[in-house]
Image (cartoon, rainbow, N blue to C red):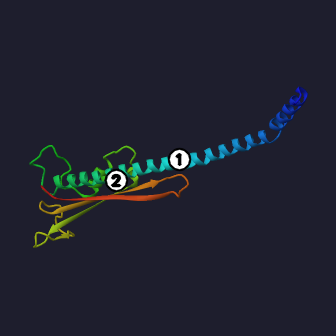
């Protein structure tokens, strides 16, 4: 049967080994590993989060581009080459490409930089067949019965952490028949 002195000595040896020896060493190594794992996991999680935010902004930008193209086309078809006598509240009749571009750039969506915006306007005339159209290059191109197409392109800066910075062109177009 062990004596009390022997038991106390055994406990002291075990305590010295655990406190001053490998137990403390193992705790320190594990704490450092947890810190590194947390840093790596946080970096991946934040990169994923910022990527999702950028994709949401790209969808928002596409919505703006399609809405801007529709609004620009509507602006062009209502303000064709005819006078605005039918609708006295309208201004800027006989719409030009510059007027349409200024109108679309002035829509003022939040977060959209108008200097990254390109608006291209093309007029089409109906050919002999009602199903074919040709680009109007002379005469009154914005006459009623002709078609107008407005293409809006936005150069969206894309920034995702740990990924190269680049610009993505998001575009949409709309085409309608000029009403007046």
Q: What residue is drawn where x is 81% and y is 35%?
A: 19
Which mark is on residue 114? Answer: none
94 relative position to 106: left or right: left
Front-most of residues 16 and 170: 16
Q: Position of residue 11 (x, y in %)?
A: 84, 31
Q: Position of residue 25 (x, y in %)?
A: 78, 42
Label 2: which secondary element: helix
Q: What residue is drawn where x is 17% and y is 46%?
A: 90
Which mark is on residue 45? Answer: 1
Q: CA distance from mark 2 to mark 1?
A: 26 Å
Q: Position of residue 59 (x, y in %)?
A: 36, 51
Q: Are there few (<14), some (14-19), or many (20+) residues within 10 Å of tag 1? A: few
Identify the residue at the far top of this view: 4
Q: Are there few (<14), some (14-19), or many (20+) residues within 10 Å of tag 2? A: many
Q: Which residue is mark 2?
A: 62
Q: Quadrant of the N terminus?
A: top right
4 relative position to 132: left or right: right
* Sequence-wise first label, 2 or 1: 1
43 relative position to 173: left or right: right
Label 1: which secondary element: helix
């Amino acid at each position: 049967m062990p004596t009390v002195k022997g038991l106390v000595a055994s406990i002291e040896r075990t305590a010295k080994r655990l406190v001053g020896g490998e137990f403390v060493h193992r705790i320190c190594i594990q704490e450092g590993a947890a810190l590194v794992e947390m840093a790596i996991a946080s970096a991946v999680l934040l990169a994923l989060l910022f990527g999702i935010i950028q994709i949401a902004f790209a969808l928002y930008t596409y919505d703006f581009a399609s809405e801007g193209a529709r609004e620009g086309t509507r602006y062009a078809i209502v303000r064709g080459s005819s006078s605005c006598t039918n609708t006295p509240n309208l201004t800027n009749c006989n719409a030009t490409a510059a007027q349409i571009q200024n109108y679309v750039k002035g829509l003022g969506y939040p977060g959209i930089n108008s200097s990254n915006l390109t608006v291209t306007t093309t007029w089409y005339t109906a050919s002999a067949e009602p199903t074919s159209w040709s680009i109007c290059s002379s005469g009154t191109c914005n006459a009623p019965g002709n078609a107008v197409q407005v293409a809006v392109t936005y150069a969206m800066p894309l920034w995702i952490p740990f990924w190269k910075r680049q610009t993505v062109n998001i575009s949409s177009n709309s085409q309608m028949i000029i009403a007046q």
